Amino acid sequence: MQIFGVDIGGSGIKGAPVDLDRGALAQERYKVLTPHPATPDGVAAGVKQVIDHFGWTGPVGLTFPGVVTDGAFVRTAANVDKSWIDTDARALFRDVLGGLPVTVVNDADAAGIAEMQFGAGRGRRGTVILLTFGTGIGSAVFVDGVLVPNTELGHLELHGHEAEKQASSKAKDDHGLTWEQWAHRVQKYLAHVEMLFSPELFVIGGGVSRKSEKFLPHIDGLRAEVVPAQLQNNAGIVGAAMRAAQQD
Ligand code: BGC
Protein backbone atom coordinates (compact mmCIF):
# COMPACT_ATOMS: atom_id res chain seq x y z
CA MET A 1 0.00 0.00 0.00
CA GLN A 2 1.15 3.55 -0.74
CA ILE A 3 0.38 6.84 1.05
CA PHE A 4 1.91 10.20 0.25
CA GLY A 5 4.32 11.67 2.84
CA VAL A 6 5.36 15.32 3.05
CA ASP A 7 8.09 16.68 5.33
CA ILE A 8 7.80 20.42 6.04
CA GLY A 9 11.17 21.73 7.17
CA GLY A 10 12.84 25.07 7.78
CA SER A 11 14.51 25.06 4.35
CA GLY A 12 12.48 22.70 2.16
CA ILE A 13 9.10 21.03 1.68
CA LYS A 14 9.76 17.55 0.30
CA GLY A 15 7.50 14.65 -0.46
CA ALA A 16 6.98 11.35 -2.25
CA PRO A 17 4.61 8.40 -2.31
CA VAL A 18 5.72 5.94 0.38
CA ASP A 19 5.66 2.17 0.11
CA LEU A 20 4.39 1.30 3.59
CA ASP A 21 5.40 -2.36 3.40
CA ARG A 22 9.06 -1.49 2.83
CA GLY A 23 9.15 1.84 4.72
CA ALA A 24 10.78 3.42 1.68
CA LEU A 25 10.00 6.02 -0.95
CA ALA A 26 8.14 4.52 -3.91
CA GLN A 27 9.41 7.27 -6.25
CA GLU A 28 12.18 9.83 -6.09
CA ARG A 29 11.17 12.66 -3.79
CA TYR A 30 10.38 16.17 -5.03
CA LYS A 31 11.35 19.30 -3.10
CA VAL A 32 10.37 22.98 -3.18
CA LEU A 33 11.91 25.69 -1.02
CA THR A 34 10.06 26.69 2.15
CA PRO A 35 8.80 30.27 1.69
CA HIS A 36 10.08 32.97 4.05
CA PRO A 37 8.20 33.99 6.08
CA ALA A 38 6.84 30.45 6.39
CA THR A 39 3.17 31.45 6.72
CA PRO A 40 0.28 28.95 6.58
CA ASP A 41 -0.81 30.05 3.08
CA GLY A 42 2.76 30.11 1.72
CA VAL A 43 3.57 26.64 3.08
CA ALA A 44 0.21 25.25 1.89
CA ALA A 45 0.98 26.50 -1.64
CA GLY A 46 4.36 24.72 -1.49
CA VAL A 47 2.71 21.49 -0.31
CA LYS A 48 0.24 21.70 -3.22
CA GLN A 49 3.13 22.06 -5.68
CA VAL A 50 4.76 18.89 -4.30
CA ILE A 51 1.52 16.86 -4.45
CA ASP A 52 0.63 18.16 -7.94
CA HIS A 53 4.08 17.16 -9.21
CA PHE A 54 3.01 13.51 -8.69
CA GLY A 55 -0.69 13.98 -9.60
CA TRP A 56 -1.46 12.30 -6.25
CA THR A 57 -5.14 11.89 -5.31
CA GLY A 58 -5.03 9.65 -2.21
CA PRO A 59 -4.39 10.16 1.55
CA VAL A 60 -1.54 12.43 2.64
CA GLY A 61 0.51 12.55 5.87
CA LEU A 62 2.43 15.75 6.63
CA THR A 63 5.02 16.66 9.22
CA PHE A 64 5.10 20.04 10.94
CA PRO A 65 8.03 21.50 12.94
CA GLY A 66 5.99 22.25 16.07
CA VAL A 67 3.52 20.70 18.52
CA VAL A 68 0.53 19.18 16.69
CA THR A 69 -2.48 17.83 18.59
CA ASP A 70 -5.20 15.49 17.25
CA GLY A 71 -3.46 15.16 13.87
CA ALA A 72 -4.59 18.72 13.10
CA PHE A 73 -4.00 21.61 15.47
CA VAL A 74 -0.68 23.46 15.52
CA ARG A 75 0.18 24.66 19.03
CA THR A 76 3.75 26.01 18.74
CA ALA A 77 5.84 27.54 15.96
CA ALA A 78 9.44 28.06 17.13
CA ASN A 79 11.01 28.14 13.65
CA VAL A 80 8.08 29.06 11.37
CA ASP A 81 5.74 32.05 11.24
CA LYS A 82 3.89 32.58 14.54
CA SER A 83 0.56 32.88 12.68
CA TRP A 84 0.56 29.04 12.60
CA ILE A 85 -0.29 28.88 16.29
CA ASP A 86 -3.80 27.46 16.81
CA THR A 87 -4.45 26.95 13.10
CA ASP A 88 -6.26 23.81 12.01
CA ALA A 89 -3.49 22.62 9.69
CA ARG A 90 -5.46 19.54 8.64
CA ALA A 91 -8.32 21.73 7.34
CA LEU A 92 -5.86 24.14 5.68
CA PHE A 93 -4.05 21.38 3.77
CA ARG A 94 -7.25 19.46 2.98
CA ASP A 95 -8.78 22.58 1.42
CA VAL A 96 -5.72 23.49 -0.65
CA LEU A 97 -5.47 19.85 -1.83
CA GLY A 98 -9.09 19.74 -3.01
CA GLY A 99 -10.44 17.63 -0.15
CA LEU A 100 -7.79 14.83 0.06
CA PRO A 101 -7.70 13.07 3.49
CA VAL A 102 -4.88 14.66 5.50
CA THR A 103 -3.08 13.92 8.80
CA VAL A 104 -0.48 16.19 10.41
CA VAL A 105 2.19 15.06 12.91
CA ASN A 106 5.20 16.66 14.60
CA ASP A 107 8.31 16.23 12.41
CA ALA A 108 10.49 14.50 15.01
CA ASP A 109 7.63 12.20 16.05
CA ALA A 110 7.22 11.23 12.38
CA ALA A 111 10.96 10.51 12.03
CA GLY A 112 10.82 8.45 15.23
CA ILE A 113 7.81 6.42 14.06
CA ALA A 114 9.73 5.51 10.88
CA GLU A 115 13.00 4.71 12.69
CA MET A 116 11.25 2.48 15.26
CA GLN A 117 9.61 0.40 12.54
CA PHE A 118 12.20 0.37 9.75
CA GLY A 119 15.44 1.85 11.07
CA ALA A 120 17.76 2.17 14.05
CA GLY A 121 15.04 1.55 16.68
CA ARG A 122 13.61 -1.61 15.13
CA GLY A 123 12.75 -4.18 17.79
CA ARG A 124 14.11 -2.00 20.61
CA ARG A 125 12.23 -2.10 23.94
CA GLY A 126 12.56 0.18 26.95
CA THR A 127 13.01 3.94 26.53
CA VAL A 128 14.32 5.04 23.14
CA ILE A 129 14.81 8.74 22.32
CA LEU A 130 15.23 10.00 18.78
CA LEU A 131 16.63 13.52 18.49
CA THR A 132 16.71 15.41 15.19
CA PHE A 133 19.36 18.09 14.76
CA GLY A 134 18.43 20.61 12.07
CA THR A 135 17.04 24.16 12.20
CA GLY A 136 15.90 23.25 15.73
CA ILE A 137 16.19 20.12 17.87
CA GLY A 138 13.21 17.79 17.70
CA SER A 139 12.52 14.83 19.97
CA ALA A 140 10.51 11.62 19.86
CA VAL A 141 10.30 9.49 23.03
CA PHE A 142 9.26 5.82 22.85
CA VAL A 143 8.56 3.44 25.71
CA ASP A 144 8.43 -0.21 24.58
CA GLY A 145 7.78 1.04 21.05
CA VAL A 146 4.90 3.36 22.03
CA LEU A 147 5.32 7.07 21.24
CA VAL A 148 4.86 9.78 23.90
CA PRO A 149 3.90 12.56 21.43
CA ASN A 150 5.03 16.19 21.32
CA THR A 151 7.85 15.95 23.87
CA GLU A 152 9.75 19.11 22.73
CA LEU A 153 13.07 18.25 24.40
CA GLY A 154 14.88 20.73 22.14
CA HIS A 155 13.57 23.53 24.33
CA LEU A 156 15.11 22.21 27.54
CA GLU A 157 17.27 24.78 29.26
CA LEU A 158 20.95 23.94 29.36
CA HIS A 159 23.46 26.13 31.21
CA GLY A 160 20.99 29.05 31.06
CA HIS A 161 20.27 28.73 27.32
CA GLU A 162 17.66 26.97 25.25
CA ALA A 163 19.28 23.73 24.06
CA GLU A 164 18.32 24.08 20.39
CA LYS A 165 19.92 27.53 20.21
CA GLN A 166 23.18 25.94 21.41
CA ALA A 167 23.29 22.52 19.80
CA SER A 168 21.10 22.34 16.66
CA SER A 169 22.94 22.00 13.36
CA LYS A 170 21.85 25.57 12.59
CA ALA A 171 23.65 26.63 15.79
CA LYS A 172 26.77 24.83 14.50
CA ASP A 173 26.65 26.95 11.34
CA ASP A 174 25.57 30.19 13.06
CA HIS A 175 28.38 29.96 15.65
CA GLY A 176 30.99 28.68 13.15
CA LEU A 177 31.69 25.53 15.25
CA THR A 178 33.94 22.67 14.14
CA TRP A 179 32.41 19.19 14.26
CA GLU A 180 34.36 18.50 17.44
CA GLN A 181 33.20 21.70 19.14
CA TRP A 182 29.63 21.01 18.13
CA ALA A 183 29.88 17.36 19.29
CA HIS A 184 30.98 18.65 22.70
CA ARG A 185 27.74 20.65 22.97
CA VAL A 186 25.66 17.70 21.76
CA GLN A 187 27.39 15.51 24.35
CA LYS A 188 26.38 17.89 27.17
CA TYR A 189 22.84 18.02 25.87
CA LEU A 190 22.59 14.21 25.64
CA ALA A 191 23.98 13.89 29.17
CA HIS A 192 21.24 16.25 30.39
CA VAL A 193 18.49 14.30 28.59
CA GLU A 194 19.99 11.04 29.92
CA MET A 195 19.89 12.42 33.47
CA LEU A 196 16.15 13.08 33.04
CA PHE A 197 15.03 9.95 31.16
CA SER A 198 17.71 7.21 31.41
CA PRO A 199 17.03 5.91 27.89
CA GLU A 200 18.59 2.68 26.60
CA LEU A 201 19.17 4.19 23.18
CA PHE A 202 19.58 7.61 21.53
CA VAL A 203 18.97 7.76 17.77
CA ILE A 204 20.50 10.85 16.16
CA GLY A 205 18.44 12.06 13.19
CA GLY A 206 18.26 15.04 10.86
CA GLY A 207 20.66 15.95 8.06
CA VAL A 208 23.68 15.35 10.34
CA SER A 209 22.87 11.62 10.55
CA ARG A 210 24.52 11.26 7.12
CA LYS A 211 27.80 12.55 8.59
CA SER A 212 27.80 10.66 11.88
CA GLU A 213 31.48 9.67 11.50
CA LYS A 214 32.36 13.36 11.97
CA PHE A 215 30.79 13.74 15.42
CA LEU A 216 29.86 10.39 16.98
CA PRO A 217 33.52 9.51 17.76
CA HIS A 218 33.62 12.66 19.96
CA ILE A 219 30.58 11.60 21.99
CA ASP A 220 31.27 9.30 24.93
CA GLY A 221 30.67 8.97 28.64
CA LEU A 222 26.96 8.18 28.26
CA ARG A 223 25.33 5.03 29.59
CA ALA A 224 22.94 4.93 26.63
CA GLU A 225 23.96 3.63 23.23
CA VAL A 226 24.11 6.44 20.62
CA VAL A 227 23.51 5.55 16.96
CA PRO A 228 22.70 7.48 13.77
CA ALA A 229 19.24 7.28 12.22
CA GLN A 230 19.12 4.88 9.28
CA LEU A 231 16.42 6.43 7.11
CA GLN A 232 18.32 9.71 7.32
CA ASN A 233 16.52 12.54 5.54
CA ASN A 234 13.59 10.38 4.41
CA ALA A 235 12.46 9.43 7.92
CA GLY A 236 10.00 12.34 8.17
CA ILE A 237 8.34 11.56 4.82
CA VAL A 238 8.05 7.84 5.65
CA GLY A 239 6.80 8.48 9.21
CA ALA A 240 4.19 11.02 8.07
CA ALA A 241 2.78 8.47 5.61
CA MET A 242 2.82 5.74 8.32
CA ARG A 243 0.93 8.04 10.69
CA ALA A 244 -1.67 8.83 8.00
CA ALA A 245 -2.17 5.08 7.49
CA GLN A 246 -2.74 4.59 11.25
CA GLN A 247 -5.43 7.31 11.26
CA ASP A 248 -7.54 5.72 8.49
C1 BGC B 1 10.06 22.55 17.57
C2 BGC B 1 9.74 21.07 17.52
C3 BGC B 1 10.35 20.45 16.28
C4 BGC B 1 11.83 20.76 16.22
C5 BGC B 1 12.48 20.24 14.96
C6 BGC B 1 11.56 22.73 17.51
O1 BGC B 1 11.87 24.09 17.54
O2 BGC B 1 9.55 23.15 18.73
O3 BGC B 1 8.35 20.86 17.53
O4 BGC B 1 10.14 19.07 16.31
O5 BGC B 1 12.07 22.15 16.31
O6 BGC B 1 11.93 20.83 13.83
Image (cartoon, grey):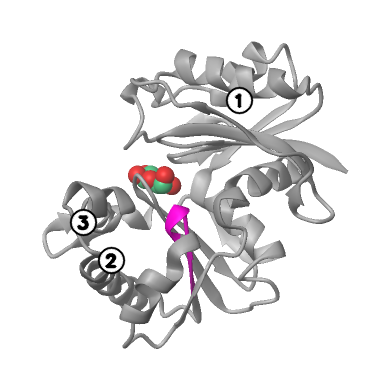
Position in image of residue 128 (x %, y %):
53, 72
Q: Residue at x 34, y 24 (%)?
A: 81
Which comes sooner in the sequence, label 3 or label 2? 3
Q: Dot 1: what SS?
A: helix
Residue placed most toward the observer, 204 or 142: 204
- Residue indicated by mark 3: 166
Q: Nearer the viewer, mark 3 or mark 1?
A: 3
- Residue indicated by mark 1: 90
Residue 75 numbered mark, or none: none
The quadrant in which the C terminus is found is top right
Q: Is residue 86 left or right of residue 25?
A: left
Which comes sooner in the sequence, label 2 or label 1? 1
Residue 245 painted magenta: no
Q: CA distance from mark 3 to mark 2?
A: 13 Å
Say which amino acid is labelled 3.
Gln
**Quarter where residue 167 is shown:** bottom left
Residue placed most toward the observer, 48 or 29: 29
Residue lying furthest left in this view?
A: 160
Residue 206 painted magenta: yes
| Mark 3 Cα shell of 10 Å, populated few (<14), some (14-19), many (≥20) | many
- Residue indicated by mark 2: 179
Q: Dot 2: what SS?
A: helix
| Mark 1 Cα shell of 10 Å, populated few (<14), some (14-19), many (≥20) | many
Disc 3 vs disc 2: Cβ atoms closer than 8 Å?
no
